[in-house]
Image (spheres, grey):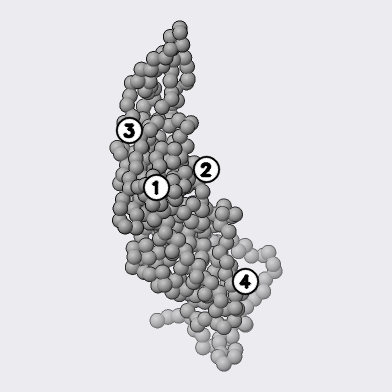
Amino acid sequence: MDGIGTTHYPRAAFGQRDFLDLSPEIRKVPAGSVDGDAFVRAAPAYRDTEATAALRAYLEGDRPAQASPMERCVDRFLDGQLSEEELRAEYERLLKQELFGTMPDPAAPLSDWQKETATDFYSAFRRQILQAAAARNNAEGARYLTGEMDPQRSWSYYDSHWYYASEAAISAITAGAQSVAGEHGSSFTAPDYLAQGATDCYNFNTALRGDPFVAFDGRCVTDPDAVPPQGFRWFFEQGGDARSAIVRMDSLTITDEGGGETVLRYADAAFDPTDPSRARTWVSCTDEDGTSHWLSARFRFCDAIRTVADLVSFSEKDTPGATLLNRFLANLPARPGRQPVFTPPAGPGLDRRV
């Protein structure tokens, strides 16, 4: 095979090895005399923002065709295939791989760069836990929807199982992060995600928000630190029909000359999935002994109704944990997630009260 002959080049020693000495062929030219763009041009495949998004997608497992080690690890834990101790051990392994690659763990303390990398890895892992728990919660809640979804409608679902599962996973990786830091003469403290506005990294209450959930202060649960009872579930849905602008009146109040009122009601309290002013909600809780308690309500939106606790409440006679249950219900909004496309104006004889 023909090629470039190299036998006439001398060899230069460098350390314990020698290389071809090409210095006789090197020529210097005046600066600026060569247009480098004429033969060297870089055309990046990604813009900076796209590269960042691609890297984040891999770390957090957003690519549908390829699950990252982080995503697989979280899914196995939520599926019940990993215990908390096994999740912690797997997290430590992945973190050390991120910090040291395939090299053995050095005895030296972590550098500032490694500490920053460890925090970034922890945040990405924690975000993946909460996103996965929220996704499973959403898929579970979608089964309870009535009728066809519409851009005007909204709904919320909360299963405390995913709150406690995500808290257990966060506890495991936090312990793993502290363990790795301690092995290298350092310490680890989780960032203050609420102060940073990183609600997707704080807890299940703050991660469970946004479309299609009820937009009330940007959260599905108003108090981010509210702890749900074990075995608790809540569902809420609002009706709506963006294709219709028909004004719907359910009652008319007629006042006579003497001040007497006659109320004519045109509609009952049944839930209509096409009516944006109507909604329904239900709450269930299972005691430690396996006893289930269920409450539901159908209602129309009005100023007096702000939380689920305004609609339903548990009794201490029936449920031992009624106080805790009712306190948590007060943190669940019962407000429309999307305002109706058309709201009829108030006028004489028009009664918009429930």
Assess whether mark 1 and mark 2 are in contact (beta carbons under 8 angstroms): no
Distance between mark 4 and mark 3 Cα atoms: 58 Å
Pinpoint residue 131: horizontal percent, then vertical percent. Answer: 43, 56
Report which residue position mark 1 lands on: 316
Image vertical order of residue 124 relative to residue 321, above or below: below
Front: mark 4 or 1: 1
Pinpoint residue 141: horizontal percent, then vertical percent. Answer: 34, 48
Pinpoint residue 112: horizontal percent, then vertical percent. Answer: 62, 71
Image vertical order of residue 202 relative to residue 309, above or below: below
**Could you tell me the amino acid type at mark 1?**
Glu
- Label 2 residue SS: loop
N-term mark: 1 or 3: 3
N-term mark: 4 or 2: 4
Q: Which image quarter is the N terminus in?
A: bottom left
Report which residue position mark 2 lands on: 217
Viewer-proximal residue among 86 and 292: 292
The part of the image, by quadrant, that contains residue 133 is bottom left
Residue at x-position 52% and y-position 43%:
217
Image vertical order of residue 211 relative to residue 261, above or below: below
